[in-house]
Image (cartoon, rainbow, N blue to C red):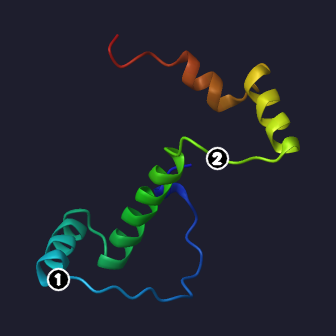
Amino acid sequence: MAIADRPTPSKDIVINLRAKQSQRELIDQAAAALGKSRSDFMIESSLRAAETVLLERLFFHLDEAAYAQFIAALEGPPQLNERLLTTLSAKAPWE
């Protein structure tokens, strides 16, 4: 699920940051270009960066049961679902 597709829960915590004036101005320009508030822009950007960091990890630890489940999922056939079928039947962009 893409970040923009996620439901927005109530905002109940504050995150304070210190930045240089030039950094704030750049963030404000980018947020305005997308029609977003500074807060929404910064949260969405931070979430994308956090997801990237976690998805690019090369090492992760699993206990034996979780490892067995992981290997079974890798070695087993794909679970057919509507989204997978749509993707497999879509024309490649270079075609």
Residue holding disc 2: 60
For the point 72% across and 29% down, the residue is 81
Residue at the (53%, 46%) spot, across then down: 57
Q: Is residue 13 left or right of residue 49?
A: right
Q: Judge whether 31 appears above or below 14 on screen.
A: above
Query: Of circles 1 and 2, which is in front?
Result: 2
Q: Which residue lies at the image location 21% right of the left edge and 72% below the top edge?
A: 27
Density class for disc 2 (Cα within 10 Å; few <14, some 14-19, many ≥20) is: few
Q: Nearer the viewer, residue 14 or 18?
A: 18
Q: Which mark is residue 32?
A: none
Mark 1 to mark 2 CA distance (whole Å): 35 Å
**Amino acid type of the residue that numbered disc 2 sits on in the rendered structure:** Phe
The numbered dot on residue 20 is 1
Q: Whole-percent x and y of residue 7? A: 58, 65
Local SS, label 2: loop
> Looking at numbered disc 1 in the image, what kind of residue is underneath it?
Lys
Judging from the image, what secondary structure is the residue with disc 1 in? loop
Up the image or down, 54 lies above or below 56; here it is below
Q: Is residue 42 above or below residue 80?
A: below
Label 1 or label 2, whichever comes before in sequence order: 1
Q: Residue at x 34, y 85 (%)?
A: 17
Q: Who is closer to the viewer here, 90 or 23?
A: 23
- Mark 1 packing: few (<14 Cα in 10 Å), some, or many (20+)? few
In this rendering, position of residue 38 left or right of residue 28: right
* Residue 70: percent from left, percent from top: 77, 35
Q: 44 or 15, which lies in front?
A: 15
* Farthest top residue in view: 95
Count of numbered tags: 2
The C terminus - image quarter? top left
Residue 74 x %, y %: 73, 26
Give percent across and percent down for residue 37.
31, 76
Q: Which picture quadrant has residue 23? A: bottom left
